[in-house]
Amino acid sequence: MEEVPEEITGEMQIRQYMYEKAGEFQGKLREDGEDSGLIIMGYRKQKEKGCMELYQRLKKMSEYFRFMQEGKIYMESDLQEKVSPGVTEKEWDMEVLNDNFRNHQAEKITEDIGQMYQTVREPVWDKNGLITLTEKLRNHLNDLCRRSPGVRFEMLLQQEAGRSIFLDEIRDRMTEIYRKANRMVQNGKEAQYSIYIRKCIQYIEEHYSEEINIETVAGTLDISGVYLSQLCRKELSQSFLELLTGTRIKMAKKLLQQMPQMKMYEIAEAVGYRSSQYFASVFKKAEGMTPWEYRSRNS
């Protein structure tokens, strides 16, 4: 607590004085080799007889420190409209995150988690929502890891253990844990495949836009189409055509989301289909909706 000099009377003058004092205090901390931290300031209003009301306001605002930034100075009165008056009920679409995790879409995983954490920051700071979301993501990832032999959730947490105080740090740490788990799942699956299947997958990912079939790929591997078909069934539990179609549809979804200017026949050709009508039929069978509907929902 510090008294403002009597000659400083206007609100703007008081605020300026307080910011200067707070800045000096942070400077001293840095000189002593300490973190400058963050400062929440406030001043006693004329109708308030004592300092208890000011103390209670500052104490309440300090509960939202995770939404602030280290090194910054905040005025308590400026933050009032940013805080949530109570628990905000939210629903987070974990199915989208599931799909991107399963398809090893690292950038989409980052985007999904970022959007979820943004919902507890905007339009107001929701400290209860932050706790709920973080716990929900931890449980979700733990469940994903249980389905993947060799991926231990506890080990991931230990490897990524660190100082996560502010919301941005919590978001970035959670994102990195998800992405690391996803890489471990992907590497674990690929390590179980034979050299023929690994090369088959690689060939399809590099040539899906071309007119290819099982004989084309088998020829590059010096094996018969029949043998490659048997390997696909045995190791991937799907046919060669299903593998090729899945890759093409995955790439089509990416184009539908990221390239709104592309016409449908251009997308069809880009992923290996010479007929946009046939492409639309295959897409609907795989996704349960037409390419146009998918673009509308994900644009």
Image (cartoon, rainbow, N blue to C red):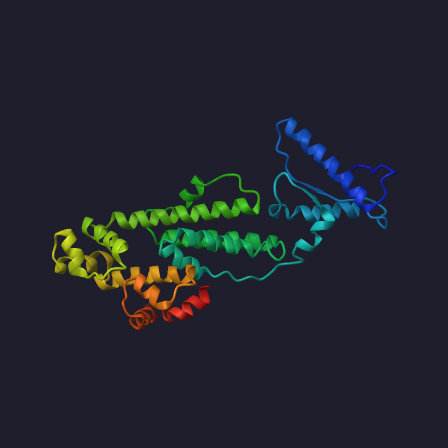
Decide which of 28, 165 is in the foreground and name it. Answer: 28
Q: How far across and how far down the image is residue 121, in percent?
A: 59, 53
Query: Toward which corner of the image does residue 97 lie, by quadrant?
Result: bottom left
In the orientation shown, which residue stands out farthest toward the top? 32
- Give the residue displayed 57% in from the left and 44% down from the top: 166
User: Residue 231, relative to residue 159: is it above or below?
Assistant: below
* Residue at the (51%, 56%) spot, across then down: 115
Residue 239 in view here? no
Q: Is residue 200 left or right of residue 158?
A: left
x 36%, y 53%: residue: 104
**How many numbered discs?**
0
- Left-right relation of 227 to 12: left
Furthest residue in direction right, as rendered: 6
Is residue 2 left or right of 119 when viewed as pictured? right
**Residue 209: % across, % down:** 27, 59
Answer with left or right where residue 43 lies relative to residue 148. Answer: right
Looking at the picture, tell me which residue is in the foreground, 75 or 259.
259
Res. 196 in view: yes
The image shows residue 59 at horizontal and vertical percentages of 71, 46
Q: Position of residue 280 (x, y in %)?
A: 33, 71
Where is the N terminus found, in terms of image quarters?
Answer: top right
